[in-house]
């Protein structure tokens, strides 16, 4: 028996006749059923290392990175020595140190440093934006920073759904 399967490739919609269809991969939430080319949380963190990499890490950045890592891993605890832990340490040291640790120092190669990773969803971006703004003295996000990078990635991922 032949089965008709609808396949999305970019903006093209194709009908494919197949003898065998793999069952869908289960996902934790509908937002995780994204395109395989979707931007991950680790990649969005690396993008902020490029766009705002010279900015010294502050508490708002550390909070945003922690929220991003928690969303990537699905765990409510940060990994010792992980990206969020290093960012938190850097933010506390930067308060009194002249040689400040920068975003780029911590977020370079974030994809490899995260214990787990997943595509960025709108919910992930909202959580990270909230964390960054709540911990910012001026209640704003950093231009090109962690929150803005995740928001941009979520917008792009939504277009590719």
Image (cartoon, rainbow, N blue to C red):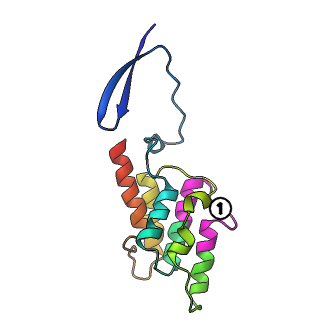
Can you say whether 75 is above or below 30 in the image? below
Residue 28 image offset from top left, x and y in percent: 54, 42
> Does the segment drawn in magenta span residue 107?
no
Q: Inspect this view and state whether residue 28 appears.
A: yes
Residue 152 image offset from top left, x and y in percent: 36, 59
* Residue range highlighted in magenta: 66-87
Q: Label 1 crowding class (10 Å Cα cut-off): few <14, some 14-19, many 20+? A: few
Query: How many numbered marks appear?
Result: 1
Q: Which residue is drawn at 48% across and 53% down?
A: 40
Instruction: Find disc 1 in the rendering and name its residue.
Output: 77
The extreme top residue here reads 1
Residue 75 image offset from top left, x and y in percent: 62, 55
Q: Residue at x 60, y 83 (%)?
A: 92
SS under mark 1: loop
Q: Which residue is drawn at 51% across and 29% down?
A: 24
* 122 and 113: which is toward the camera: 113
Can you say whether 5 is above or below 40 in the image? above
Residue 160 image offset from top left, x and y in percent: 35, 44
* 137 and 33: which is toward the camera: 33
Quarter containing the C terminus: top left
Q: Inspect this view and state whether residue 146 appears.
A: no
> Does the segment drawn in magenta span residue 69?
yes
Q: Which residue is drawn at 64% across and 70% down?
A: 85
């Amino acid at each position: 028996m032949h089965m008709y399967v609808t396949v999305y490739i970019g903006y093209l919609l194709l009908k494919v006749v197949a003898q065998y269809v793999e069952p869908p991969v289960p996902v934790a939430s509908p937002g995780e059923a994204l395109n395989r080319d979707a931007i991950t949380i680790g990649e969005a963190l690396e993008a902020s290392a490029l766009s705002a990499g010279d900015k010294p890490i502050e508490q708002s950045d550390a909070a945003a990175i922690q929220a991003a890592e928690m969303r990537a891993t699905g765990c409510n605890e940060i990994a010792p020595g992980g990206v969020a832990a290093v960012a938190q340490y850097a933010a506390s040291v930067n308060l009194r140190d002249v040689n400040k640790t920068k975003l780029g120092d911590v977020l370079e190669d974030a994809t490899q440093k995260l214990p787990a990773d997943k595509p960025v969803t709108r919910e992930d971006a909202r959580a990270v934006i909230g964390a960054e703004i709540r911990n910012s003295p001026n209640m704003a996000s950093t231009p090109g920073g962690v929150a803005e990078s995740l928001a941009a990635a979520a917008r792009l991922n939504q277009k590719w759904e």
